[in-house]
Image (cartoon, grey):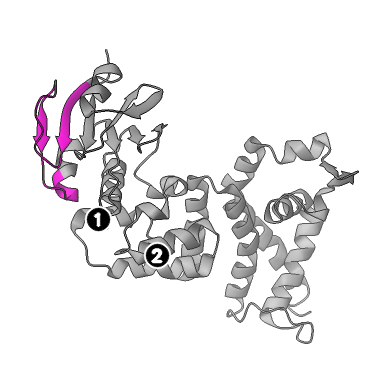
Amino acid sequence: MEPTYVLLFRPLHERVKFRCKEVLQGTPHEVVSECFNIEKGVTTEEVSGLPFPTVSVNPTLSGIYDEIKGRDVIVILPRELDSSLLFITCSFLSKSRVFYVDGEWLKEWDLNPIYLSMGLRFLDDRLIPDSLPEVKRSLWYFRNGITFLSLKEMENLRSLTMDDLSREMLSTILLPSGDDVTKIEEMVRLYIRAGYYDKAISLGRELPVIYCMRDRGYGKLQFDEKDRKSVYMTCRRALRKVLREFYPDFLDLRNYLMHMGLSASFDVEMREGFMSLSEERQKMISEENVKEVAENVLNLAKEIHERAEEILSSEGGED
């Protein structure tokens, strides 16, 4: 049975058409007649002459969502920036397979839109209106691995005034209630779902330090050779010992990713201006291995923490 789709678009003077893999300038009629079996059209203006039923709705999240929920959707992004976020939001909320036409390329993304974070790497800040600076900052901090500020900006999103559907969309990237340690664990999961495995691994490497400091009443994350008995320095020493003794491959992989492939711990060899890696190291940084390590990093962080606690307990917690 041939699949059916809903065409979601806003009529413009300059329309978009594509011939399956080729994108050209044209009209919505040409879009639907050559590539997809369209069940109906959903537009924000009155349109006539299309070879399928068309529904005209108010350009609001709720108005469009009621017409597209649960269906596969083709989204033609308008050039107006304030409308683009609206259309992107609806496509995620539709919980369906989505085809985006952005005026230049046809992109087929098979996403699980329940977690908006999976699509964060595809969203361009230029598509988000200036009226939503909190969303822009939150996405920017998240993508660039600035954990603490990303946490705070995500919390700021809770205070935004918006309709129920917009709030539902934003709730997919908000973190659960609780302390920041709990939220950091959830952020690791967000990075994994979004495909940012390097950031998930780097954050997972730091979590045992946070766990250890939590067990000792917290303190400041500060390297200070003059105060080697501080909570942070005590935890850091024990964890570095555990990592070097029991998890050298994990530590090497994290360093390699963190240093953009130019880590001395990964034995990068340079000859006459060219760099190379051994076959064994190349296997360690394969997509399959990096993904597997990232998906297990929360369990690994707890395991590393337990080993560090054994060391500290045997020392009476003293350095």
Task: Residue at 39% x, 65% y: name it.
Answer: 154
Image location (x, y in percent) of residue 99: 34, 32
Task: Residue at 90% x, 43% y: name it.
Answer: 271
Task: Residue at 34% x, 44% y: name it.
Answer: 114
Image location (x, y in percent) of residue 115: 38, 47
| Image disc number at residue 284 | none
User: To which residue does mark 1 refer?
Assistant: 166
Callout 2 secondary element: helix
Query: Is any part of residue 302 visible from this angle?
Result: no
Residue 124 vertical placement versus 39 (above, below): below
Callout 1 secondary element: helix
User: To which residue does mark 2 refer?
Assistant: 154
> Tag 2: Cα neighbours inside 10 Å, few (<14), some, or many (≥20)?
many
Query: Is any part of residue 64 visible from this angle?
Result: yes
Residue 136 vertical placement versus 17 (above, below): below
Q: Is residue 198 left or right of residue 92?
A: right
Image location (x, y in percent) of residue 13: 21, 39
Q: Earlier in the sequence, mark 1 or mark 2?
A: 2
Quarter of the view holding residue 313: bottom right
- Viewer-proximal residue, 276 or 12? 12
> Tag 1: Cα neighbours inside 10 Å, few (<14), some, or many (≥20)?
some
Image location (x, y in percent) of residue 213: 62, 74
Image quadrant in which the C terminus is located: bottom right
Magenta-colored span: 38-63
151 is within the stretch colored magenta: no
Task: Residue at 64% x, 53% y: name it.
Answer: 300
Quarter of the view holding residue 25: top left
